[in-house]
Amino acid sequence: MFSIILPLYNKESSIESTILSVLNQTLIDFELIVVDDGSKDQSIHLVRNIKDKRLSIYCKENGGVSSARNLGISKAKFEYICFIDGDDIWESTYLQKMSELISLYPKAGIYGSAWAYRYRDKIVTPNFYIKDRSVEIENYFSHAYKHTLFSSSSVIIRKYVFDKVGLFDERIKMGEDLDMWIRINIQFKAAFLNEVLAYYVMDAANRACTVLCPLDKHLLMYLEKFDCLRKENVALDIYIGHYCLRQGVPYYFHSGCKDHIRCLLMKLSLSNYPFFWRIIYSSQLWRINCWIYTLYKRLR
């Protein structure tokens, strides 16, 4: 059976649709744990109006999505932990098909399905670079460095895995999910279903990704804990390297953050990465790149 954890913070415009996508699953044997993280809108009142014996609600002071997920994990009754954010949507067959994936690969520690971005009436599916319909992944990092396979609303994790790798890092406000995927995939195999069963809703109100997170709360500041493992695992090193290059761009052109990003870049051999990254982070072209980035933000 599944314990589904839904962290909630100010999602009054979307929370009902999200919960209905869970309650309308074809597989009905689950519990839904909603953890309200100090919402200031009508979110929690809308949830309380939904009557279903599988739904339980916990309220706490605002502490961030990681603390809400961790509370949900501590309350979970069942072996498999699912997550869904308060503005995302599942296909009605999500749990059924993920249950079948678990049966196919019972030794994996984490399971994920393909997912897609939804913006109004448009659906955009990333290229996951996997051809098979389902696969057990020995080395997650060699598959996921081009594009992450998992999103926080499309994974299922065995509960005992958290006993091995720990809970979500509550210091991290951006990248906390990827930090967890790294810790899990270092120790456990992953299984992936190459069928879109979850949707990341881009036009939802109050999405955390629409605001630049303070650097001291970003995963970029906590990657040092993986330094020793990166020396032993080439795929992990490349995976983290690509993450640093992608996520570091806005901070590289932000006053007060550039020096830390430079320290991260010193651990990378940029010659091993695509040429355009060397152009973006070129010290000789820094002023031009900064002007282009500023113009891009204004036009976006």
Image (cartoon, rainbow, N blue to C red):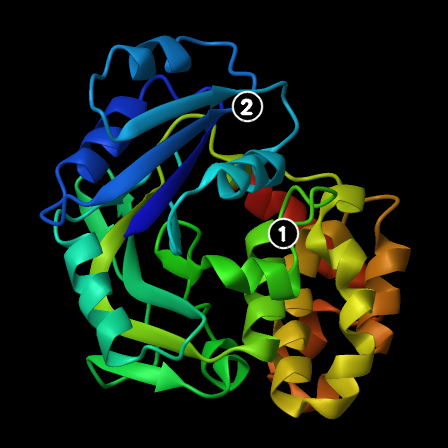
Q: Position of residue 115 (x, y in %)?
A: 29, 58
Q: Position of residue 207 (x, y in %)?
A: 47, 34
Lateral position of residue 102 relative to residue 93, left or right: right
Which amino acid, by three-letter code, is at mark 1? Leu
Seen in the picture, residue 78 relative to 12 is either above or below; the reply is below
Does the image show residue 14? no
Lateral position of residue 124 relative to residue 39, left or right: left
Looking at the image, which residue sits at the far left?
A: 26
Q: Nearer the viewer, mark 2 or mark 1?
A: 1
User: 130 or 158, which is in the foreground?
Assistant: 158
Q: Secondary structure at mark 2?
A: loop
Residue at (60%, 84%) from the top-left corner?
274
Q: Position of residue 110 (x, y in %)?
A: 43, 68
Residue matched to label 2 = 37
Which numbered disc, 2 or 1, marks the residue that appears first in the sequence? 2
User: 68 or 141, which is in the foreground?
Assistant: 68
Seen in the picture, residue 195 relative to 81 is either above or below; the reply is below
Residue at (60%, 41%) from the top-left corner?
66
User: 226 or 144, which is in the foreground?
Assistant: 226
Residue matched to label 1 = 167
